[in-house]
Image (spheres, grey):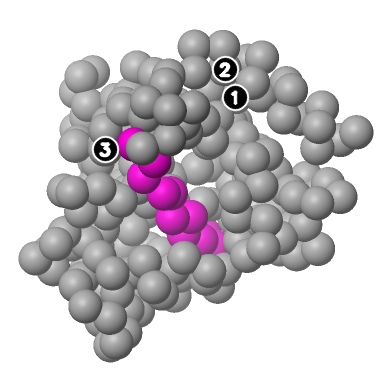
């Protein structure tokens, strides 16, 4: 029997609408990269534990008014630890761009619906108001892989959604995967990525 791939969840925050300089650049979908901004460096992307991510698949879950949605599931990743943060990389050609937020599979909606019902078992007993709050509380700092049954279901849901996706369902630029546009849009993504990488490796 083939073992289900290891899957970890990365919770993506919503853009800060009140911050004029907010561009919300990471993940860099186009280059198959996540982590260089250091936002998850104390938990999922801790550099001293980065090696544990090698070969895993990362499920990027984006919150918003329409629920927490699975905008992307990476191919197997490679972890690169730096002094104060780490980066994961994957084959961007194989993975493609993420779903638009509104077209992505639902992990949990405000009323408790999920396209991946197995995942609800992980956080349904969390003592927090609201379904999305329960999930955020459980997964914000979690770096434990999903149980095998949950990972298998999530991968199946993802594959089925990708198979029936229409061209308009996929993000054209990175902001399409967000629930709303940030105050600024980063149109120089390569330069931003290169600058962050240079800073991390200096």
Asked if residue 13 lies left or right of residue 120, the reply is right
The answer to whether one can see residue 11 in this image is yes
Which of pointers 2 and 1 indicates the residue nearer the eye?
A: 2
Q: Is residue 150 left or right of residue 180?
A: right
Q: CA distance from mark 1 to mark 3?
A: 21 Å
Query: What is the quadrant of residue 50 in the picture?
Result: bottom right
Position of the C terminus by quadrant: top right
Query: Could you say where residue 200 lies in the image, as x and y percent from the top left?
Result: 80, 37
Would you say residue 14 sits in the magenta stretch?
yes
* Residue in view at x 60 percent, y 50 percent: 39
Measured from the top left, where is residue 16 in percent x and y? 39, 41
Find residue 189 and name its label.
2
Q: Earlier in the sequence, mark 3 or mark 2?
A: 3
Q: Secondary structure at mark 2?
A: helix
Residue at image point 46% right, 31% down: 22
Residue interval drawn in magenta: 1-17
User: As rendered, which of 60 and 64 lies closer to the eye?
Assistant: 64
Q: Secondary structure at mark 1?
A: helix
Instruction: Return the residue at label 1.
Output: 31
Q: Position of residue 110 (x, y in %)?
A: 14, 62
Tag of residue 179: 3
Asked whether the beta carbons under mark 2 and mark 1 sit within 8 Å of each other, the answer is: yes
Q: Residue at x 50, y 42 (%)?
A: 74
Q: Nearer the viewer, mark 1 or mark 3?
A: 3
Secondary structure type for disc 3: loop
> Residue at the left extreme?
111
Spatial CA distance of label 2 from label 1 is 9 Å
Q: Tell me if mark 3 has few (under 14), some (14-19) or many (20+) residues whose alpha carbon lies within 10 angstroms of its own.
A: many
């Amino acid at each position: 029997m083939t073992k289900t791939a290891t899957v970890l969840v990365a919770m993506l925050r919503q853009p800060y609408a009140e911050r004029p300089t907010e561009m919300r650049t990471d993940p860099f979908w186009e280059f198959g990269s996540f982590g260089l901004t250091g936002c998850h460096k104390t938990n999922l992307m801790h550099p001293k534990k980065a090696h544990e991510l090698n070969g895993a698949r990362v499920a990027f879950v984006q919150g918003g008014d329409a629920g927490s949605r699975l905008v992307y599931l990476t191919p197997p990743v490679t972890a690169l630890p730096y002094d104060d943060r780490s980066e994961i990389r994957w084959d961007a050609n194989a993975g493609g761009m993420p779903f638009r937020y509104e077209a992505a599979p639902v992990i949990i909606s405000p009323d408790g619906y999920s396209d991946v019902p197995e995942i609800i078992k992980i956080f349904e007993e969390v003592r927090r108001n609201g379904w999305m709050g329960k999930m955020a509380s459980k997964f914000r700092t979690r770096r434990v892989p999903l149980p095998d049954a949950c990972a298998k279901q999530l991968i199946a849901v993802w594959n089925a959604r990708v198979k029936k996706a229409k061209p308009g369902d996929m993000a054209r630029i990175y902001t399409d995967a967000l629930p709303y546009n940030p105050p600024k849009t980063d149109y120089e993504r390569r330069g931003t990525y290169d600058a962050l990488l240079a800073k991390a490796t200096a």
